[in-house]
Image: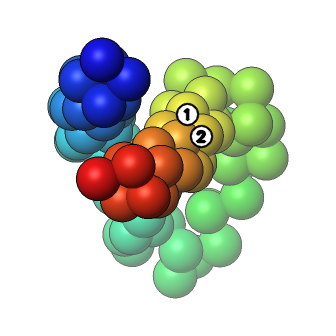
Amino acid sequence: MLKTVLIVVFVLICIALSVIVLLQEGKSAGLGSISGMADSYWGKNKGRSIEGNLEKFTKFAAAALLIVALILNIIW
């Protein structure tokens, strides 16, 4: 029973992590980095924006994925 629940949680975390990574923008600053425009208001306050929240959730989901995979490996 526990193995089945963990497999379902594992699949849900995999799907959520895939969606969150696809929602994020690329890291390339483009031509704005050449002229020094990379440090804008949004760049300085990135942790409070939607993009910052996506990055935080990505880190949390990746850690949860690794933990659940380790537990499944031990149980299996």
Which residue is pictured at 39% across the width and 69% down the height?
28
Above or below, 74 relative to 54: below
Above or below, 4 relative to 19: above
Which residue is pictured at 52% across the width and 82% down the height?
34
Confirm whether residue 19 shows in the render: no
Q: Quadrant of residue 50?
A: top right
Q: Identify the element where label 1 is drawn.
A: helix
Q: Is residue 70 left or right of residue 24?
A: right
Give the amino acid type for the residue marked by disc 2 in the picture. Phe
Q: Is residue 58 left or right of residue 49?
A: left
User: For the residues carrying marks 1 and 2, which lies nearer the camera in this image?
Assistant: 2
Q: Position of residue 66 (x, y in %)?
A: 47, 56
Q: Position of residue 37 (x, y in %)?
A: 61, 62
Give the amino acid type for the residue marked by disc 1 in the picture. Phe
Q: Position of residue 22 (x, y in %)?
A: 22, 41
Residue 57: mark in rendering: 1
Residue 60: mark in rendering: 2
Q: Nearer the viewer, residue 56 or 34?
A: 56
Q: CA distance from mark 1 to mark 2?
A: 5 Å
Labels 1 & 2 near each other (Cβ < 8 A): yes
Confirm whether residue 13 shows in the render: yes
Q: Nearer the viewer, residue 9 or 30?
A: 9
Above or below, 63 relative to 10: below
- Say few, some or many: other residues with alpha carbon within 10 Å of mark 2 (under 14 / 14 to 19 / 20 or more): few
Q: Nearer the viewer, residue 10 or 53?
A: 10
